[in-house]
Amino acid sequence: MDEIINLYLERLLSIYTIFDIPYNNEPCSYFNKLKTFKLSDIEIKTAEFGSQICEFRSQIVNYLYTELENYMPNTSKLIGPDLTLDFLLKSGGLKNLVKFPSSTLQILGAEKAFFKHMRNGTPPPKHGIIFNYPGLSSLPPGKRGQISRIIANKMAITIKMDYFHRAGDIDSIISYINGKIKNQV
């Protein structure tokens, strides 16, 4: 949806720059701002359509996050809903994801680098999708692999908890990971 919104905005910007309406780097607020200017009916309709696309995206995101909270509450709380969705999509579902060891979870999304390592002997990848975990990218490059391994280990536990519908103390796991990240900085 973001791609659709950005493409739509890109087409409209060429029109609205004629009217000296500045862009503020946020497409949805820009569409709403356009509706306040005195424009022709077709121009107002294009702005309203942009706002409707943004509203639809918000509804989809809220629905996905709500369903994800019910489907994988522990993992979603640990790594966030966006990362959880990325892992679900890359693995093909929770049933497949639960089968992966933590080492696979750590490099999931870095398959190209992994197979290049296997073929050519280049250094192995230290992280894949998990690199988007909050705070991991800000660590020194030499420490990222160690922390991503810790996150993958804890994530393997929460995935199994979600699969078998068990509850647990995720807050202590999060504080453990955050403590490890702070010690590395």
Image: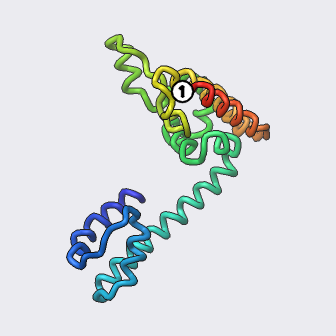
Q: Residues within 10 Å of mark 1 (few under 14, many from 20)?
A: many
The answer to which image quadrant residue 13 occupies is: bottom left
Tell me how the rendering is colored: rainbow
The residue labelled by disc 1 is 106
Query: Can you say whether 148 is above or below 165 in the image?
Result: above
Left or right position of 114 against 159: left
Return the residue nearer the eye: 89 or 114: 114
Which residue does the image show at 59% across and 26% down from the upper left? 100
Return the residue nearer the eye: 67 or 110: 110
Left or right position of 56 against 173: left
The answer to which image quadrant residue 75 occupies is: top right
Q: Which residue is the extreme one toward the top?
A: 121
Left or right position of 127 against 50: right
Please provide percent x and percent y for residue 4: 36, 61
Which residue does the image show at 71% across and 35% down from the upper left? 175
Return the residue nearer the eye: 150 or 70: 150
Query: Can you say whether 85 is above or below 33 in the image?
Result: above
Query: Can you say whether 3 is above or below 50 in the image?
Result: above
Return the residue nearer the eye: 173 or 50: 173
- Quadrant including the N terminus: bottom left
Please provide percent x and percent y for residue 82: 54, 47
Tally of numbered discs: 1
Which residue does the image show at 49% across and 34% down from the upper left? 138
- Quadrant including the C terminus: top right
Please provide percent x and percent y for residue 26: 41, 63
Local secondary structure at mark 1: helix
Please provide percent x and percent y for residue 45: 35, 82
Which residue does the image show at 49% across and 30% down from the upper left? 108
Q: Looking at the picture, which amino acid does disc 1 mark? A: Gln
